[in-house]
Amino acid sequence: MLRFVLPVAFASCVVAYFGLPYIERLLAEWFRSDVELRAQLVMHSMEEPITDLVKKGNESRLRAYLAKVTADERLLAVLVCRPDGSAMFKTERAPAAISCDAAGDRNAATRIVQLPSGSVQISRFDFDSAEPIPFRVLMLHDLSFVDRRQRTARDFVLVFVGISVLLLALLIVLVAWLQLRRWAEVLIGDIRGKRFLDDAESPRASMPILFQVRKVLAEAEEKQRLEIDFHENWTPQALRQVVRDHLHSAQVIIVSNREPYIHNFDADHHPVVQVPASGMVTALEPIMRACSGVWIAHGAGTADRETVDRYDQIRVPPDDPSYTLRRVWLTEEQEQGYYYGFSNEGLWPLCHLAYVRPAFRAGDWRAYEAVNAKFADVVAAEANTDSPVILIQDFHFALLPQLIRKKIPKATIALFWHIPWPNAETFGVCPWKREMLLHMLSADILGFHTRYHCQNFLNTVDRFVECQIDHEHMTVTLQGHVCRVAPYPISIEWPPRWLQHLPDIATCRAAVRERYGIGAEVCIGLGVERWDFTKGIIERFHALEAMLAKNPRQRGRICLLQVAAPSRAQLPAYQALQQHTYSEVERINAKFAEGNWQPIVLIDHHLEPLRVFELYRAADFCLVNSLHDGMNLVAKEFVAARDDEDGVLILSTFAGASRELAEAVLINPFDVTETAEAMETAMRMGRDERRNRMNLMRRTVKENNVYRWAGRMLMDAARIRQRQSLPPASRRHATSDR
């Protein structure tokens, strides 16, 4: 209440302070004018008698007459003066301090004289034309009543102002109390009904204070909800909150070989945008949408150079730009050695237990070093702060952490390894194993999909690098730098944005059946992969063949729709895989085809994500039989696409996703018979069991979505940044000793 009362009291004091002198001056002038007018009236009435008495020199009668005139207490005295200033006559109460000489300037008819007894107004009247004796009359009026009335008026004004302020304050307090009581009632109703989350333009929001309170409550509710989301349901908003509150809006830079959007020329030589078939891109792209950072990647599209600005940058996504894509250009020799050579003929088969022999060449290693150094230069150029958060993706950039550390010492660096990490003995095959490990350990965080891969990495470091390893906390200390090794199971965005552009399940199923000539009674099995020897595509075909051979009644009742997106087609192993795939499809279809039905439909070209999700929604079961996989996001995409809670997931135990999606039908992909039995199980499974399994898997994917994956890593990075900002303990002790 004081906020309302004090301003009113202050304003009243200001008015009284400046108003009282004005009122006093106004009253004084008013009374003096009244006294002057009264003096003139009195003089007018006594002009003839006093002139006659002065002429006759009758002093006794003049004394009697003036005594009668001065009987009025306000008329203090009358002096009759000669022109030379001597007194001709003055009444008894004339003050000794005032004489005829006090008449002063002849031009001043009235003046005020201050006496010990109070103010006296002297009014002068000249009778120069009087014959035979000219004279003047000084009429003295007592003004002490004016002073008394001024004091009375001042006291009245002060009392009036005080009472007015008190009444006004009481009125304000009463109105404020009633208003606050009303607002409190409305606010309690808002809190109980959570109406403070409604649109700010609602009628109650027109009350300013209530609007502010509702705004604060809404912000608190949002922050609390986001804090809950950190543990239960991660969202893009929760991820932005982490970047803003925990990382203090630090710049986020992602580095990967594959770019999220590729520009290629079409048949008319016009640039068209393509989203690559990459699980890593699928996972990371929603994160960049949320964090609005910079994505640095190799520009491999035929129209990539035509679409960037002079800084080799382009804003993406094309439909709603929210972050910057910075493209890096490589020569054909660099791409051949770094990407196709060391990365995909060396590290890829080394880390995957697919029994393809890795090839390591010195020239490929030199290209790998050169490209990593080139990306480090680009990262340094794109960093707009001395402490950005840099998320390095995958085995293409094992050397990047140390190279960036030398250029940006305060950067927070996380390297996430998207593929499996083999055991120490297997990794020992790499000729440059120690160099790679030393560069990787310059990161603050090394992330893998599973704890098993983390343990393999720590064992590898223990064998080949002299360092301190804390297995309990999973940290590696090398030359004073601490690197944290932790599992971060990657996932997908929830819900997938593609679903909002797709119709219901029945419509998708009808469209897919019509497009690929699949009958209404045929069960659709689905496989979605890049054309890679780790994905078990050939093993999948053999399992289907075994099932049809063992159970002829299934012929004509199942069709395997296989999407194989071309990948690394320049490499001999991949070329051989493609030829083997074509021959197996042709052989199996020729063996079992009946009429319009064929057991395998091969889609040997890239499909946009929207079409892939349409296939997910149309399939009766999805077969993910990877021979070895870090995570495999196809399994999670299939689960996320099935908002009808139907469909069966058959999942390899050698895929990281099997650690989370335990409700899938788990298989050993090398066991063709087990895979064939799993397909039959999926075809026979009842609706209730399918719903129960899918419901549990959808809950898992929802809770452990890609925002949680990124959020956990970024929160760990935030703790590391906070820890690094603290002074060393030795310095603190030295300071305290001083």
Image: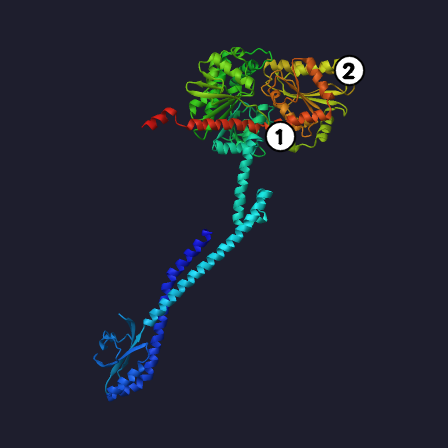
Q: Quadrant of the C terminus?
A: top left
Residue 397 x %, y %: 50, 20
Residue under label 1, please give it.
496
Residue under label 2, please give it.
552
Please state which of residues 527 and 200 is positioned toward the viewer in this rendering.
200
- Is 724 left or right of 293, judged from the image as shown? left
- Is 29 left or right of 486, judged from the image as shown? left
CA separation in Å, label 2 and label 1: 39 Å
Q: Is residue 306 above or below residue 8?
A: above
Q: Residue at x 47, y 12 (%)?
A: 464
Q: Secondary structure at mark 2?
A: helix
Amino acid type, residue under disc 1 in the picture = Pro
Q: Residue at x 54, y 44 (%)?
A: 214
Name which quarter of the figure residue 696 lies in: top right
- Is 491 left or right of 132, judged from the image as shown? right
Query: Dot 2 surroundings within 10 Å: few (below 14), some, or many (20 or more)?
Result: few
Query: Dot 1 surroundings within 10 Å: few (below 14), some, or many (20 or more)?
Result: some
Q: Do we see residue 138 in this rendering?
A: no
Residue 633 x %, y %: 61, 23
Q: Secondary structure at mark 1?
A: loop
- Is 413 left or right of 318, judged from the image as shown? left
| The label number, if any, that marks residue 619 in the structure image | none
Looking at the image, tell me whether mark 2 or mark 1 is earlier in sequence order.
1
Q: Do we see residue 351 in this rendering?
A: yes
Amino acid type, residue under disc 2 in the picture = Pro
Residue 461 x %, y %: 48, 14
Name which quarter of the figure residue 640 lies in: top right
Residue 595 x %, y %: 79, 19
Name which quarter of the figure residue 723 lies in: top left
